[in-house]
Image: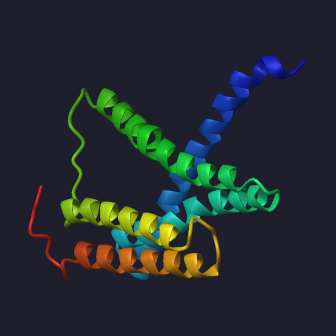
Amino acid sequence: SSRKFFPITFFGSITWIAVFSYLMVWWAHQVGETIGISEEIMGLTILAAGTSIPDLITSVIVARKGLGDMAVSSSVGSNIFDITVGLPLPWLLYTVIHRFQPVAVSSNGLFCAIVLLFIMLLFVILSIALCKWRMNKVLGFIMFGLYFVFLVVSVLLEDRILVCPVSI
């Protein structure tokens, strides 16, 4: 009898996610400011880990039930949703509220970070292929190593220790 209320519960869930996401970013900003860690590093580490933990939990639960394809699809799908809805929707709302003024995005080495993401994607696919398309401990260590390399290079780009030759 409650099925007719699914649109209300869906939008209610999205609203709660939006509220807690805002609070999480604000808290991370305050903690980073208090400790002396830059916003970029907080975003690359703490916020990235905090937003990935729910994906991790659901993927582990589903994988233990023997549905490995669903576990991988959940992780990939949530990131695609974040990129296609989670980023554009707040920017669209911001531009509508501010009379369609463009949103300034500033990041040191943004172009190189995007190229780095594509390179990391290539290495992820290659490492999965090298492990014969099976999840095992070796693949887990490779993935952790790739994330560590990505994190180090991104922080070096953001702190201008490495300088991106192309600027946008």
Please identify the quarter of the rendering in which residue 123 is found. Answer: bottom left
Q: Position of residue 19 (x, y in %)?
A: 58, 45
Please identify the quarter of the rendering in which residue 166 is found. Answer: bottom left
- Seen at 68% across and 49% down, the residue is 70
| Extreme residue in the front direction | 132
Image side of residue 2 versus residue 74, left or right: right
Residue 29 at least partly seen: no
**In this rendering, is residue 44 above or below 36?**
above
**In this rendering, is residue 100 above or below 90?**
above
- Seen at 56% across and 59% down, the residue is 51
Please identify the quarter of the rendering in which residue 52 is found. Answer: bottom right
Q: Position of residue 125 (x, y in %)?
A: 44, 63
Image side of residue 7 versus residue 3, left or right: left
- Seen at 52% across and 63% down, the residue is 27
Residue 95 at least partly seen: yes
Q: Quadrant of the C terminus?
A: bottom left
Q: Position of residue 1 (x, y in %)?
A: 90, 18
